[in-house]
Image (cartoon, rainbow, N blue to C red):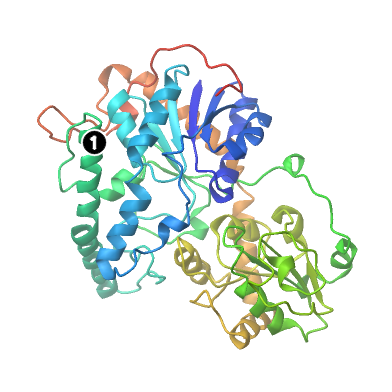
Amino acid sequence: MRFLISSFPFAGHFNPIQPIVKELVRRGHEVLWITGRDYEARVTSLGADFYPMSEEALIHDYEDWEPVRGSTGFSALSAVLRRVFIDRIVPRVRDYQAAVKTFPADLLLVDFRPAGAHTFCDLTGIPYATLGVNPLVTPDSEVPPWGTRELPPRTPVGRLWNALRHSLGNWLVHGKLIAALNERRVELGLPRLPPNTSFYRIMQSDMLHIMMTTPAFEFPRAHFRPSVKFVGPLLPSDDDIRFVPPPWWKDLLAHPRERVVHVTQSTVHAEDASLIESAVLALADRCDLLVVVTGGGAANIFKGCEHHGSIGEGDVAKMHKPANVRVAPFIPHPKLLPHVGVMVTNAGYNGVLTALACGVPIVCAGRTEDKPDVSSRIAWVGAGVDLRTDKPTVSALRKAVLEVLAEPRYHEAARRIQIDFAKHNGAVEAANELERAVKRVEAHRETSTINRVDGEGRMLRCSQTLHKGGNTGQRRTRGSS
């Protein structure tokens, strides 16, 4: 089988796909991976072929989430979502088209922003699957709207309120996104989608949407779509982790795990070390605790630490490193977290899943991107404390960390999820689902009706499972671009 992969060149998007690609290659499948040039060596080291994402399709992922200056409310939300999900569809589709000229793909797997894959599917007939690199977003009344940081309602009135808000969002925001998507479709020679098309259905493949978690760490719903498959965390194997322990590693191994606090902040927003600073100040006088700090600007906030260039000398006031603090720019979480009692984080999805896979409870302080949704799930399952801000006070952080360390219920909840995660092999299960998807396509290639719109613009029955996949072309030379 031939799998075309497309992911944005950011660690949170690239890393979860690595185990899947490694497993597909191990099974003898051909893989061509479209991503940024900085990741070429990592792609080819897995045995996959590399195809460079065009400059027009590349984005500065987290900058796209910043609201347009002066915009507010639904107008601001609509503008951000259009920039994130719609604006670069055409160059993205062009990348896919160029790749399949020499690589006859059976299926396309995308990590995020799949409107381009949906459009490409309508153009070429090549089916696509999606990988959920963030919590599952659906318009079900059992779950709150995306980004609200709320917990699932416990009453019929709460569910009715959610249903109304989902409908309002579809009317005020999603309709504009479908209109913008239709502009791109017309540019590519496709008919428009009906105005009432659900944007949620565009954002997840009807054939296969892989979730890199389990229902144990997701809001409950009466019914999950049949296309949603929970495979468990997509973590690297020990053989894939290159790790040189820092000089202080023996201090960590000698310290009681339940008294170790790990503090981490985004490697993307390295210039913002506020969470690290607040956590260090909150715990500096606790000589019984060992505080392990990592992140893009971790070493740069302390006097006497090596400057790694991620923060300018004048950007953050230097502080003296307390005696109970250990610092490293980066330590692979699968190596560090088995020795940690609680993690303080801005709630990146990958890091949270890895922590829970190691049975580590969490104190989270995140506000941007999908972090409110990750944080609300941590609170819902009882595996930590959501501080409900990305700028927590020193006293709030101290209280939360000490509470999680002292209360067994947080550790018990994290341990329950760890046990559930351990029942799964994410890479193997994801590869199994991708193979099954291709086989379904092959079995029904003569009765395809996949995500098609007829000549008069009417939506036909969306069913990628009945679609003919692949097209003709020459096999791509491994490692070429």
Residue 152 horizontal/vertical position (percent): 38, 69
At x 54%, y 57%, the residue is 349
- Report the front residue among 245 and 383: 245
Secondary-structure class at tag 1: helix
Residue 430: percent from left, percent from top: 53, 37
Residue 282 against residue 346 in the figure, above or below: below
Residue 214 shown left or right of residue 223 in the figure: right
Picture coordinates of residue 374 (x, y %)? 49, 63
Residue 393 vs residue 153, the one in the foreground: 393
Q: How many marks?
A: 1
The location of residue 428, given as percent across then percent down, is: 59, 36
Extreme-left residue of the structure: 456
Relative placement, left or right, of 252 versus 18 is right
Q: Residue at x 41, y 38 (%)?
A: 208
Neighbourhood count class around disc 1 (C-alpha, 10 Å): few under 14, some 14–19, many 20 upward = many
Res. 452 image quadrant = top left
Q: Please determine whether, in this image, residue 183 is positioned above or below residue 468.
A: below
Could you tell me if residue 404 is visible in this image? Answer: no
Amino acid type, residue under disc 1 in the picture:
Arg
Is 174 or 362 nearer to us in this picture? 174
Kindly indicate the quadrant of the structure image that contains residue 453: top left
In the image, taking residue 335 as reference, residue 49 lies left or right, namely: left
Relative depth, front residue between 349 and 94: 94
Which residue corresponds to mark 1?
185
Visible residue check, residue 5: yes
In the rendered image, the quadrant that contains the C terminus is top right
Q: Residue at horizontal 39%, vertical 36%?
A: 92
